[in-house]
Image (cartoon, rainbow, N blue to C red):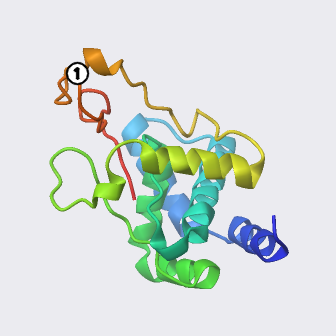
Amino acid sequence: MARLALRRMQSVMEHNLHNPRMRFSQWFQKEHGSRVNVVHLDNVEREYKRWMFICGSQPDDTPVGVGRAELVDEFWHQHLLFSREYTDFCDEHFGRYIHHQPCGDGFKNVPAELDGLEPFEMFLEEYKKEFGQDAPEEYWPRFSVPPVDSCGGGSGGGGKCSQCSSCNKGGNGR
């Protein structure tokens, strides 16, 4: 990794995200009925920061899919609520704002490049290249795609799989 990229990654990883952590903890307790373990919270924050680093390292705001990473996506939502902090974080580390684009079934005008598995697969490749390991499945669940000929979700068994709701319950993207 180039020195500049290494410095940027270290800066992202050291950035204090106290407010989003607190909001995430409150969300987790409400959603799951229990307090989040501090180690688990640290891991979610680490994975969020790694994902943001990869997003911010892409040229021209290339979409990077978050896949089905519910906890990482939720941490991002909590960070976005602190809009000034989030904007400052993006400007400081990436020189630009990283936009959030919900996608999945039912949304209109979702850019085609966010459809399907490609943005998430690209993320997984970048993760391994940048961090020297596979993205942990606990935080980055992989899609389970049925064979195309058995697809019952609009692909009709012969078209390109777009990870519709038949396969992808609650898929997300950037």
Q: Nearer the viewer, residue 80 or 137?
A: 137
Q: Nearer the viewer, residue 13 or 41?
A: 13
Q: Tell which residue pokes out farthest to the top in this image.
A: 150
Q: Nearer the viewer, residue 71 or 59?
A: 59
Where residue 169 appears, as percent x and y from the top left, is: 30, 33
Tag count in the figure? 1
Q: Residues within 10 Å of mark 1 (few under 14, many from 20)?
A: some
Q: Tell which residue pokes out farthest to the right in this image.
A: 3
| Image point (63%, 78%), residue name | 93
Where residue 33 appears, as percent x and y from the top left, is: 42, 35
In the shown orientation, is residue 72 left or right of residue 152?
right
Quick check: can you spot residue 42?
no
The image shows residue 13, relative to residue 106, as above or below, that is: below
Where residue 124 appears, as percent x and y from the top left, is: 59, 45
| Image point (20%, 44%), residue name | 105
The image shows residue 124, relative to residue 87, as above or below, that is: above
**Is the N terminus in the top left, top right, bottom left or bottom right quadrant?**
bottom right
Q: Nearer the viewer, residue 34 or 142?
A: 142
Q: Which quarter of the figure has residue 108?
A: bottom left
Identified by mark 1, the residue type is Gly
**Is the C terminus in the top left, top right, bottom left or bottom right quadrant?**
bottom left
The image shows residue 31, relative to residue 107, as above or below, that is: above
| Image point (57%, 85%), residue name | 95
Q: Which residue is mark 1?
A: 157
Quick check: can you spot residue 143?
yes
In what element is the residue under mark 1?
loop
Q: Which quarter of the figure has residue 111?
A: bottom left
Where residue 53 appears, as percent x and y from the top left, is: 62, 65
